[in-house]
Image (tube, coloured by chain):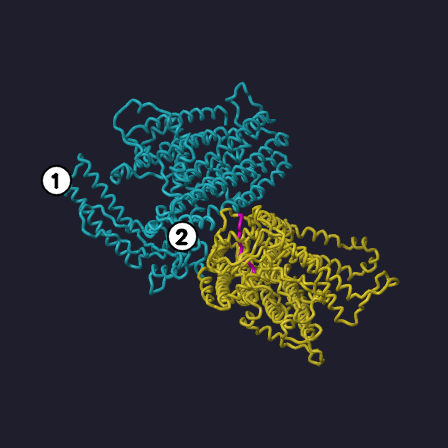
Chain colours: A yellow, B cyan
Amino acid sequence: MLVSALLTSLAINSGLCILFFVLYSILRKQPSNYAVYVPRLLAEGKSKRRSHFNLERLIPSPTWLKNAWKLSEEELLSSSGLDAVVFMRLITFSLKVFSFAGIIGIFVLLPVNCTGELHIVDFTNLPNNSLDVFTISNIGNGSKRLWIHFSAVYVVTIFICYLLYYEYRYISSKRMAYFYSSKPQPHHFTILVHSIPVSVESSVSESVDRFFSEYHPSTYLSHIVIHRTNRLRSLINDAKQLYGRLTHLKSDDTQQKYHRSCCFGLCGRKVDLTDEYEKQLVDIEKNLRLEQSEVSSSGHKEARAAFVSFKSRLGAAIAFHLPQSSNPIEWVTEEAPEPDDVYWPFFSSSFMHRWISKLTVVVACITLTILFLVPVLIVQGLTNLSQLKTWFPFLESILTIKIVSQVITGYLPSLILQLFLKAVPPIMKFLSSIQGYISHSNIEKSACNKVLWFTIWNVFFATVFSGTAIYVVDIFLEPKQIPGKLAVAVPAQASFFIAYVVTTGWTSVCSELFRIIPFSFSLIKRPFTRSTDHELEVPSLPYHKDIPRILFFALLGITYFFLAPLILPFLLLYLCLGYIIYSNQFINVYAPRYESAGKFWPIVHDSIIFSLVLMHAIAVGIFTLKKLSLASSLICPLPIFTLLFNDYCRKRFLPIFVAYSAESLIKKDRQEENDPEMSEFYNKLVIAYQDPALMPVRFSSSSDGLNSPLISSAQV
Amino acid sequence: MLVSALLTSLAINSGLCILFFVLYSILRKQPSNYAVYVPRLLAEGKSKRRSHFNLERLIPSPTWLKNAWKLSEEELLSSSGLDAVVFMRLITFSLKVFSFAGIIGIFVLLPVNCTGELHIVDFTNLPNNSLDVFTISNIGNGSKRLWIHFSAVYVVTIFICYLLYYEYRYISSKRMAYFYSSKPQPHHFTILVHSIPVSVESSVSESVDRFFSEYHPSTYLSHIVIHRTNRLRSLINDAKQLYGRLTHLKSDDTQQKYHRSCCFGLCGRKVDLTDEYEKQLVDIEKNLRLEQSEVSSSGHKEARAAFVSFKSRLGAAIAFHLPQSSNPIEWVTEEAPEPDDVYWPFFSSSFMHRWISKLTVVVACITLTILFLVPVLIVQGLTNLSQLKTWFPFLESILTIKIVSQVITGYLPSLILQLFLKAVPPIMKFLSSIQGYISHSNIEKSACNKVLWFTIWNVFFATVFSGTAIYVVDIFLEPKQIPGKLAVAVPAQASFFIAYVVTTGWTSVCSELFRIIPFSFSLIKRPFTRSTDHELEVPSLPYHKDIPRILFFALLGITYFFLAPLILPFLLLYLCLGYIIYSNQFINVYAPRYESAGKFWPIVHDSIIFSLVLMHAIAVGIFTLKKLSLASSLICPLPIFTLLFNDYCRKRFLPIFVAYSAESLIKKDRQEENDPEMSEFYNKLVIAYQDPALMPVRFSSSSDGLNSPLISSAQV
């Protein structure tokens, strides 16, 4: 790749970025777009739809940029919770890393590379230079200059490890502080028990009551048995939709309220739609209540799982940490998620069931990751010109135009790949959801991991080795040769990844500004469910999509920093854009639906460690390839120390993210011992984990006395 | 190898076995050997030294054989504990496996192999047949007969998995029953806490007291801080030796009680040895008490670790299972071992110290395992004839005799290997002891694992690939080619391993009968320490040596059963011999020093699973090599299902071996709630974990009032 090509791409993409920013600046100020661009402010009532027109609305203003950039951590914490803080710290962490690496890369490594042995930079005609002259490829075999790269690898590794330690410690302390400052929360007092053994003569509820009254008499408070409510949930959805349509009809006078009961409106009488909907709604509600009472009264809809609440945090922790039953696959305990975070359709049946579904998902994920490129390549193969001509003969005349054919052959395959890639996060999220996780946050976390490894495998390794993942697996089955093969393949793709950061990175992060638009379609499709701005559905940030993306760019930066330091300024720009955009779409758009209190950080930590070790492997290979075997041997201690450092961090910090200590639980319990508000909290706690599908529902205006509360399954 | 060679070896070794048995039958009846052959009976007072002579003492009798064979599990459990039962079940488990595999192997596979395509057995001259005609090597490529081997692999895998499941369940239930039937034991009520943070103004003891009174007020009973008592222990040893010598002098009138104080006894006056020893002893005891009081009063000898006892088992379990401190590397808890099982010189200093020593040991073990054969080969290389002649010129005349030179060149190298191998279990035990384990049982368990993997690596793989372990590592770095390489190499070594079972296996197990002899040397060296039979030191079975040995033979049997079924009858005989000898050397010799309640079984389970998967890998390779690719593909699900089965067992049974459940702990606690003996038990519990080096010691006859108890560090 020539410098000129990069400059062209840079110009195009910078232009696009500025255009996106200007467009967004204007569009966000249009009141009709408020629901799309500032749903959060709208829902919180902080922003009102102003209908009066003024000129200011049409002029792009940079104030939102300044606000986003200046957003302080305290503000973010109070408005969006600890998860958002952790997410933003991931970006600032990367910014710090690449600022440091950038200074070394641009001011030390780049001059060394440019004045390398193989090619001399032609300063008179800069755009015509190959990008290779800026990379390590320009250094001759056995050159002493490689020691500078060697030192850079050491210095940057030490710096990153120091930062990682500092961040882990900081986020751990934030997590502890968050716990100490939090009000009593139901999930701290509750555990989930599954694989409950049942005998013929007693129900699940009786078993739970007997077991916990027997073995945790002083701390046991109450329990709620989980029911299989899939059918109920679909009924409620039907009712909601119908209710939405009805509200819409009533509020909007322009709508046609009548339709003819016969085709084409030719025959039959007019029917009042409002009446009909009302009638249907009453029917559904009746069914719903019947089903509700059936579910909560009959035993066969009981899942063998229950939420068990305790009088203190310590009581819940004891029940969670100690193996409960002599049979390890009965009375299995888990920490309860927040009530809003519970994923109700989870697979709660039995130990075996959960085990098998987990194994299935693992196999499916691995298969998907490895075989992903096979169908993509086949579909791409089908899109050649002659094939298209056969399928769509009427296009033949257009396809013969040179520019059209160029676009099709050049962009169609990559478009198909991008479309397939777009489908991955939802697929991974679906797979995680059937894996047996009981909370949205855990599903999100697991999907985050899956997407991350998928991206590393199918974008990084598949590009580097220019082959499918099967081929990559083949390489990894001969671990001895990995550094050598990486050393040959990775630097060769340097210019590709530089271009990748500029194009895919920049535009994708800018399109974030508009990502909310697809979501707005769903608002248009069913605008009925929201009657006021306060009932607006505010989205939560899809961590499983965004964390892997940023981590992947961090991986690129870390592995390429000493090979092709030119990548660093582009990455820095990307991260700055990301910082502004994410801290903006937090202020205005996303609201936290649940709080994992920073549980995403260990994923970040692990993947940065992986990037470091990958960099070391590449360095070993490069120095061997460049005939500087002393340097390649001297790199070897570095991955070992990095892994030891990781092991230390796992021991020092990871337990804080897994469970709270007895010390902190007891301190917190004692704080509230004499708090008069606690009795009220206990009352709420007893019904906190009631399945929303079993709650009384009422949409229709008619009252028939059936909608009494159905909390019969909560045993106090 | 020819059949005749095997027959010769068989004859020699059977003769040796019978000789061993006869010798043992006679020697064990000599009263002077009682301390060597029946120390346990002697110590328990069940056997008395009879001095009257009778003829019966010189005639070998088989009654002990019958007693050993008929030893029931209940007897073994009551006399030697659950660990002995688990050990014997390992042998019976192997017996069951190889009886089943033996029937298939001898009656199905052997005839199939003998009538194979490549060679025909010459029944007229059986001894001249090669052993290869009895192995799978005799089957031609692509032969349909291989499907019989294929089925045998499936059938035996299923049978072994069934047996493994049955055994795991049985031993789990035994473990539970053992727990329910046991009297209150100190280690169920106690935990070990280490990495205790200390401030300037308070001692470790105060810290512990404050922490547990604060966070476990209702269950906390007492604690004992651990001191560094290495110097004390060596002083006590000195005193013991001196006391032994003194007792011996006093009791034995024939000994010379005087020696001259000057050289050659020419000048100076006679000194009464008894008096001198007595004086030395008093001095040592004085030092000892000074040191004791210093250790227990001054803070700087305190290790940052303590045994903390609780009023109930549940209390101890809660403190053990819950992370105690917000800083995960402070207040780290471990289950306490039995008081007799504590390994006092353990490294208790700090989290970092333990972590580093653990890493060092892991590295040392891996290095030793991989590099072990290098020095062996070098030493073996040095023992060639010309080298010996240069070193020992006076031997030249002997070395020229043909038979001597043959013996030296033929046996010296293998003797050197055996000597090196003998040194491995002690080395591994030493490494485990500095790894930071706090109990003898854990050290033994860890050493057991180390020795097992060492043996598999350096005996199995090094033989199979006829190279050093470095070469083997090289092979394992290309995992794709493992089955292929195994398939070529493993069957080629079939006759070697058949001979190995007969020679090393049989004789080693028979020499067990006399293994106690080296131990007896220590008795002879310091006979003074034992004044009566009741103070005799009874050895405990070195599990770290014997479990790996039997498991290694099980591995051989499982991997070779379908390749060379001829190995099975020899293995069966070996196991029968082992059964007799071990259940004998439990009745008479070994006494349990500690009880891990069956914690060794998971090691057995894992290594059998490993053997199965290894067998599957070999089978895949063999069927590919024999051009029956369908069979080799159809084997592939087998290792996957075996590993899944293992995963299920880990979830279903392993937790039982790790910790007792809340259910069983509470049941057991409630059983004893109103037991009047409990207050007495609590009194004992408070001082149960007193370091023996800090106990009052008194050997000398003079009393000077200094030997008052020193239990100042036990805080009630």
Residue range of the region highlighted in magenta in the rendering: A329-337
Residue A400 visible in the current orientation: yes
- Provide residue B262's location: percent of width, then percent of height: 14, 43
Residue B434 visible, this orientation: no
Quadrant location, the C terminus of chain A: bottom right
Q: Which residue is mark 2?
A: B312
Q: Residue furthest top?
A: B124
Report the residue that reaches farthest toward the front: A705
> Crowdedness of circle 2 by 10 Å Cα count: few (<14), some, many (20+)?
many
Depth check: give the residue in front, B88 or B618.
Answer: B88
Quarter of the image holding residue B260?
top left
- Across and down, in percent, residue B282 comes to 19, 48
Helix, strand or loop for disc 1:
loop
Which of the marked residues, 1 or 2, is nearer the chain's N terminus? 1
Q: Quadrant of residue A601?
A: bottom right
Q: What separation in Å lies between label 1 and label 2 (alpha carbons)?
A: 69 Å
Does residue A389 sit above or below A5 in this rendering? above
- Report the residue at 46% width, 29% height from top: B573
**Of marks 1 and 2, the one in the foreground:** 2
Q: Amino acid at mark 2?
A: Ser
Instruction: Please provide percent x and percent y for residue B675.
Output: 37, 48
Residue A44, horizontal then vertical, whole percent: 62, 72
Give SS at disc 2: loop
Question: Toward the viewer: A482 or A38?
Answer: A38
Chain letter of disc 1? Answer: B
Q: Circle 1 sits on which residue? A: B266
Q: Residue at x 53, y 48 (%)?
A: A330
Q: Residues within 10 Å of mark 1 (few under 14, many from 20)?
A: few
Callouts 1 and 2 close, C-beta under 8 Å:
no
